[in-house]
Image (cartoon, coloured by chain):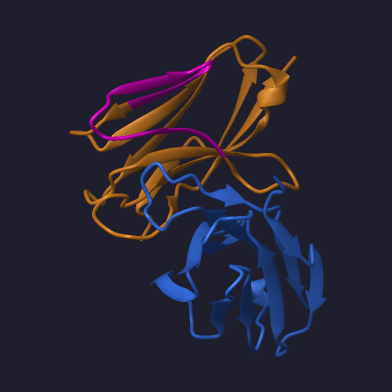
Chain colours: A blue, B orange
């Protein structure tokens, strides 16, 4: 079974631009979560989608948004990029939206650099 | 507010030695505690997980100890090998009480196993 794939793997943008990142979950997985990883703040939860509905949202500004399509693929969008948005953005998929005993499989991430 | 505190930030251990990583949490609603291992350029991967009704869980060379009253849990890596050199993250999730896969991560521990 193919793992979680994320595209693109690397991205360079300038301040003020917007960016869209894509995540394809493992086949059959309906839950997709997004995390931001930075050296200073560590791994922080952005949001989770299940069956095209946002189930949970982290403490990030409204510039961060996401969506999920009927085939479970997900995109996240960051508008009006700031230097502090430079990070590794990780996508994780799981079969269910129930947390316990429900392993989340992470993709390799998209490295976003904002200049 | 850091809900899961992890220590140490880094540690160096000789091959064959024991690596010990500690985590403490504040939110008593957490009821599932996974550990993740991350290699450079890769996303985190689930290593081992424990429920709070269990005081210890062992899988191969990896053991989790859990102290519910102290709200602390730890990972022991026995007979550490150079291939164990990675960053380890403890995490917590409200698995039963709330639907959703929101993982709250500790700050991470970079482990280096010297041959």
Magenta: main secondary structure equals strand
* Residue B109 relative to residue B114: left or right: left
Can you give x and y, in whole percent of width and height, for residue A107 in the image?
67, 53
Can you give x and y, in whole percent of width and height, for residue A47 in the image?
48, 69
- Looking at the rendered image, the quarter that the C terminus of chain A falls into is bottom right
Q: Which of A17 and A115 is in front in this view?
A: A17
From what the image shows, is residue B80 above or below residue A36?
above
Can you give x and y, in whole percent of width and height, for residue B84 in the image?
66, 25
Query: Which residue occupies 67% across, 65% down?
Result: A23
Query: Which residue occupies 66% across, 48% down?
Result: B43
From what the image shows, is residue A35 above or below residue B112?
below
Among all residues in the image, which is located at the extreme left? B69
Q: Nearer the viewer, residue B45 or A36?
A: B45
Can you give x and y, in whole percent of width and height, for residue B73 in the image?
35, 32
* Residue B111 relative to residue A11: left or right: left
| Residue B102 figure quarter | bottom left
From what the image shows, is residue B110 above or below residue A45?
above
Q: What stretch is highlighted in magenta?
A: B46-65
* Residue A15 relative to residue B48: left or right: right
């Amino acid at each position: 079974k193919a793992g979680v794939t994320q595209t693109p793997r690397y991205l360079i943008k300038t301040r003020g631009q917007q960016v869209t990142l894509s995540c394809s979950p493992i086949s059959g997985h309906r839950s997709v979560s997004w995390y931001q990883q930075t050296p200073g703040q560590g791994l922080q939860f952005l949001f989770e989608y299940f069956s095209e509905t946002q189930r949970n949202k982290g403490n990030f500004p409204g510039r961060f948004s996401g969506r999920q399509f009927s085939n479970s693929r997900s995109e996240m969008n960051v508008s009006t990029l700031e230097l502090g948005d430079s990070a590794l953005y990780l996508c994780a998929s799981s079969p269910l939206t129930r947390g316990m005993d429900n392993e989340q499989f992470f993709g390799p991430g998209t490295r976003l650099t904002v200049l | 507010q850091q809900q899961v505190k992890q220590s140490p930030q880094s540690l160096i251990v000789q091959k064959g030695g024991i690596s010990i990583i500690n985590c403490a949490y504040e939110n008593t609603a957490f009821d599932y505690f996974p550990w993740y291992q991350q290699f450079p350029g890769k996303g985190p991967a689930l290593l081992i997980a424990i429920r709070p009704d269990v005081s210890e869980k062992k899988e191969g060379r990896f053991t989790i100890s859990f102290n519910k009253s102290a709200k602390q849990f730890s990972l022991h890596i026995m007979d550490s090998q150079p291939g164990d050199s990675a960053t380890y993250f403890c995490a917590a999730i409200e698995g039963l009480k709330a639907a959703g896969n929101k993982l709250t991560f500790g700050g991470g521990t970079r482990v280096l196993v010297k041959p």
